[in-house]
Image (cartoon, rainbow, N blue to C red):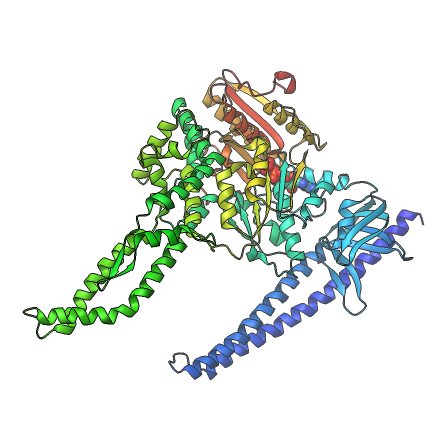
Amino acid sequence: MDSYQQNLQEEQQYLSRTLDFIGHELDREIRTLQNRKDDLLSLRKEMWENTVHFSTDFERLTEISQYLAVLNGQTTSYGTIYKQIEKYKKMLDTPYFGRFDFIEKGEAGREKIYVGLHNVVDEESYDILVYDWRAPISSIFYQFELGEAAYQAPKGTIEGNVLLKRQYKIHHGKLDYFFDCSLKIDDEILQEVLCRHSSSKMRNIVETIQKEQNTIIRDTNNELLIVQGVAGSGKTSIALHRIAFLLYHGIREKLSSNNILIISPNEVFSKYISGVLPELGEENVEQLTFDVLGTKVSNGRFNIEKRMEQLEWLIGCPAVDLVEQRKKSIAFKESNIFVELLNRLLLYYERNHIVFEDVYYAGKVIETKNLLRNQFLHDKIGRPIAKRLKRMEGMILDRIHPLRKERMFKIEKLVQKMDGHEFEIKSFSRLLSMKKSSGLMKKIRSFTQVDYFQVYRTLFDQEGLLKKLAQGLELPVDIESIIQSTRENLERGHIQYEDCAPLLFLKLKIEGNDMFSEIKQVVVDEAQDYAPIQYAVFDLLFKDARFTILGDIHQSIHKEVDISLYDNINQIFHKRKAIHLFLNKSYRSSYEISGFSQKILNLQQECISFERHEGKPLVLKKDSLENMDDAVVEDIHRFMKEGQRTIAVICKTMEESRQLHSRLKTFLDISIIASKDEEIESGAMIIPGYMAKGLEFDAVIVYDVSDCRYATELDRKLLYIACTRALHRLVIYYKDTKSSFLPDSSYFLL
Ligand SMILES: Nc1ncnc2c1ncn2[C@@H]1O[C@H](COP(=O)(O)OP(=O)(O)OP(=O)(O)O)[C@@H](O)[C@H]1O
């Protein structure tokens, strides 16, 4: 028998031993689950029979609550067993995907480490049949080749030697093939994985995580981890695997899924990525968009323009000068300078805008305005303004309280002397007292209540204030028109998206916040979409959290962003331990599509495309939109025949998408991704480019990339994003003259 046959036999034996064990454990867990279910039912029945269901009797209520405590405990353990069953079921399909043999320094024995989705441990023999991919020792599989290797164990660094590295393709419990690999995992299996068709939900990449990706997933050292990665380099995938990793290792620190939050670009994206954590055996974590955050933090007080609405306006508005003007306003309000201006505004407001008043009660001076002002300005703990004022209000009321009787006595005396109230001295006195008190409360509240919206308005309403506060800061040339249009919008109660972050910033600074105190880890995806002011808001909202921030500066569509964004973020969060890493290898698109997309950017970006070859992108001219429509319909039919599962026609705006959809839907089954509630599904769909961010499709058709429509730098980025969404096929149509951003004809077939 040759050595392959011998290895095969050994592997078959190991696989069947592992599957037998998992099958056995699965049966046991299913039995336990059934028993728990029976227990639960009988406990419920017992509770129903032995307790009263409506009672004001405290004793009986305590009885119920005792039952409920046991019931809760049993329900939780039922849930844990259920999850374990789900894990075993998955592992019966593919119990592991990799193995390496390791000799620890100073030890004689060679350990065979099989790596899979979860640990499989024989509690009786203490054998670990499969190691969870997140276990400390499993990092060797992703990080090292044959030879010397090390990993971090709880007791310190363990060094040793890797003697063998093997990968398996196991499907439905059957070993399809295996091979030994001495080098990185970018070989056959990765090729196979990347050749697959996309699906409507993002998939896990646990079998083929690359070395540089693994470093990011497993970093626990840093409080701030920033990743700049080219399109398709796996940023979102890494973010989700990192969450699964943190949950696995966070058991000791009691980190659970409700301590983690993802800031997501939009709801379509949130739905798209929502399958990965459950696939990895973890519960999903909450995802919030900045829009939702704005509504939550402001308690739904305003009707704030959505990010999509802002983008749609910027991309679709035909009045170029208006767009330019608004872009300048946006850039200003998102900048560090504006954050500084808001900080100065707060200082100014507390010193000059709060009009303290002398407080009298029962003819006595309770506090003088000077004393109140001094007290307020000499806060030594650095509490937020609103909290200081609330405390002051409390103090004043505390001093008034003991004087109430004295004053009531005085009022009664006065009422006694009045005509017409002889028979209602007490009640009339109380009425008078209440009237006086409400007048007093109004007076106190005139200086103890501060409204962040009014504070923001002051900046634009008070003549010359903004410029006065901006001394030494660089203001945009058209600051006057920015002030005026903001003033008008705020007056009308029209809150533009760019005013949302400043308002939240002021609210959090003025009122403080403990809304998200349970959040310990925040993941910000599409980091280039957020500006300094928004990061300042994140810093205030998630004060004690650690951050993982992933983005691509070349995919910013509403403004120019460069690498300094990340320095900015670093300064805003001022975390003690921070790291900035880069990913320059792209895995999504074929080699041809990736190279083509890089040309659109027209810059020397270091981007290595994974060598997966397919047909070149096509750039095709059409005489009219009707002909373009016909060609799109033909393409879609062709792609479907080829077996492409998801096909996206990417338009520039929502309006264009809607129009195209109404024209095409009579010829074929095509959906439109037009609102946040939509989900990517298999088949053909139309989507505006800015909504396609972060998503991917087997085939992409970019509609009408004529030079008059894709002309600005913003358009260039939109085009780049659209093209980098494609895995296997890319077709671009134009009318008359093609956009100058498209590579020249030597790059594609005409
Ligand atoms: N190590 C890997 N093994 C297998 N597939 C991978 C790996 N890394 C990335 N991919 C695949 O590459 C594609 C792009 O990944 P992902 O969406 O995470 O990248 P991204 O950097 O967030 O992209 P973008 O910035 O363009 O939205 C996905 O299909 C993902 O499964």
Is 503 or 466 nearer to us in this picture? 466
Q: Horizontal placement of 609 versus 67: left or right?
A: right
Q: In the rendered image of this protein, does residue 190 appear above or below residue 250? A: above
User: Which residue extends farthest left?
Assistant: 419
Residue 443, by quadrant, is bottom left
Quadrant containing ligand 1 reads top right
Is 629 or 60 nearer to us in this picture? 60
Query: Residue 81, position in %: x, y?
Result: 63, 66
Is 445 or 454 nearer to us in this picture? 445
| Image point (18%, 69%), residue name | 410
Query: Residue 721, position in %: x, y?
Result: 56, 31
Q: In the rendered image of this protein, does residue 432 appear above or below residue 351? A: below
Query: Residue 270, position in %: x, y?
Result: 53, 46
Q: Is residue 570 visible?
A: yes
Question: Quadrant of the image for the C terminus?
Answer: top right
Residue 135, by quadrant, is bottom right
Q: Horizontal placement of 296 versus 431: left or right?
A: right
Is 39 or 138 nearer to us in this picture? 138
| Image point (43%, 32%), residue name | 471
Q: In the rendered image of this protein, does residue 659 appear above or below residue 541? A: above
Q: Is residue 662 visible?
A: no
Q: Horizontal placement of 532 versus 374: left or right?
A: right
